[in-house]
Amino acid sequence: MDQHLESQLRAAKVAGRTLGRLTGDARAALVLAVANAVESNCDTILEANATDVAAAEAAGMSAALVDRLRLNASKLIGMVADIKAVAALPDPLGKQIPMCVQPSGLCVERVTIPLGVVGVVYESRPNVTTDISALCIRSGNAVILRGGSETLSTNCALTIAIKSALGQHRDAVQFINDASRERVRELICADKFVDVLIPRGGAGLGRLCAEQGTIPVIIGGAGVCHIYIDKTVTCERALSVVLNAKTQKTSVCNALDTVLVHQASMKLLGCSVCRGLSDAGVTLHAADAAAVALANAGIPFVAGKAGDLETEWLSMDCNVVVVADIDTAIDHIAEFGSHSDGILSDNPDAIGQFIQEVDSPAVFVNASTRFHDGSQFGLGAEVAVSTQKVHARGPLGLDALTSYKWIAVGDYLARS
């Protein structure tokens, strides 16, 4: 292992133990100090980000990916607000499940504790650096950050500000400023130092960490998002939600990828929604019945091809699929979904069936998938959106960064 990386990992391990022993108020104060430091270094951070954006554009990076890494004063203010929101959240540590006395006389309880050292490998978005740092500090965890090479200057500026605010606890936040893939391969196998690994990026990154790493992994970020339009919903209401889900911010994991339309609704409602998407600049991808309906309505589209339904677009593209009924829609989501899936309907029975049968990390009823976010769910910032079932699912907030230990108390008790 690279000597500098090993020294960072060792320092984080020690710092995490110290951080976990602080009171909740002390950890909250550190998070507020981080917010103030980021705010105070706004100009330096934006200058570093401008360097990253210029390099990305010169390298021919797509507009959607450049948008993910671009910062401005408004976004930075929002990042600071998110950090402060984390400081205001209840302390997740030391929560006790009330003691109960077993027949043996043993008193048993569980107490929440930090995970220890959290390793996060992520791409593009600089706010991930501040969100994760704040969440880990608040929950008493040290963190090892490895951001994408395209945001190296920005992340270096951010972590310098963060570490300056932490004082004697500065080693609790470590940033790997070596962009080589070798450092990633070493990090994901550093089980001697890192307790859990969270890859936040494309599906390939998650597979790399799970298949080649030796650290327990919480996979988050990638996935295909669906909205099913039932036959009992007005066009205006459906269009407002679908447009928001697809176009409000296209480069994020909770943006809409596929619209499923009940066949009884496609000619009028479905085509009206699709026309609205097309007018907003969305490229529609369609095959079979959806392609026929769009062609008959004179709505532009491109012929759907193999792999489209498995694609997380992260761009102004969207699949359109006509389904026979709600059962077919649910079957489609079971095959291709894994992230954020919703229904637009005024039928309570259809809504109930959808909620019951769709097994996604978040299920939305008459609401945009863009709400699948820690802050929108009342969790403050998030580390990622987990698409697995163990150890946590959906937005990973403070509680997801804790584990627990058992406390068993006896009166010099021996087992018979």
Image (spheres, helix red, strand yellow):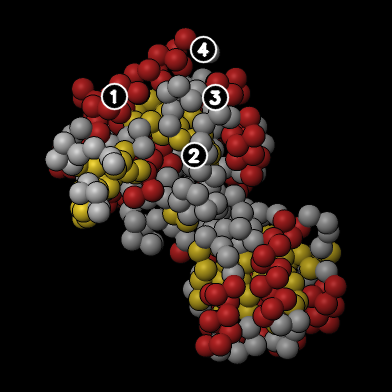
- Asked if disc 3 and disc 2 are in contact, CB closer than 8 Å, the reply is no
Where disc 1 sits, the SS reads helix
Where disc 4 sits, the SS reads loop
Q: Nearer the viewer, mark 3 or mark 4?
A: 3
The residue that label 3 is drawn on is: 189
94 or 45, nearer to the observer? 94
Q: How crowded is mark 3: few (under 14 residues within 10 Å), some or many (20 or more)?
A: some
**Mark number for residue 117?**
none
Where disc 3 sits, the SS reads loop
Q: Which of marks 3 and 2 is in front?
A: 3
**Mark number for residue 198?**
2
The residue that label 1 is drawn on is: 15
Where disc 2 sits, the SS reads strand
User: What whole-number distance in Å separates the C-alpha atoms at marks 3 and 4?
Assistant: 12 Å
Q: Give whichever of discs 2 and 4 has the lower sequence position.
A: 4
The residue that label 4 is drawn on is: 2
Q: For the point 56% across and 87% down, which residue is it?
A: 349
Q: What residue type is labelled 1?
A: Ala
User: What whole-number distance in Å separates the C-alpha atoms at marks 2 and 4?
Assistant: 21 Å
- Asked if disc 1 and disc 3 are in contact, CB closer than 8 Å, the reply is no
312 or 315, nearer to the observer? 312
Q: What residue type is labelled 4?
A: Asp
The answer to which image quadrant residue 209 occupies is top right
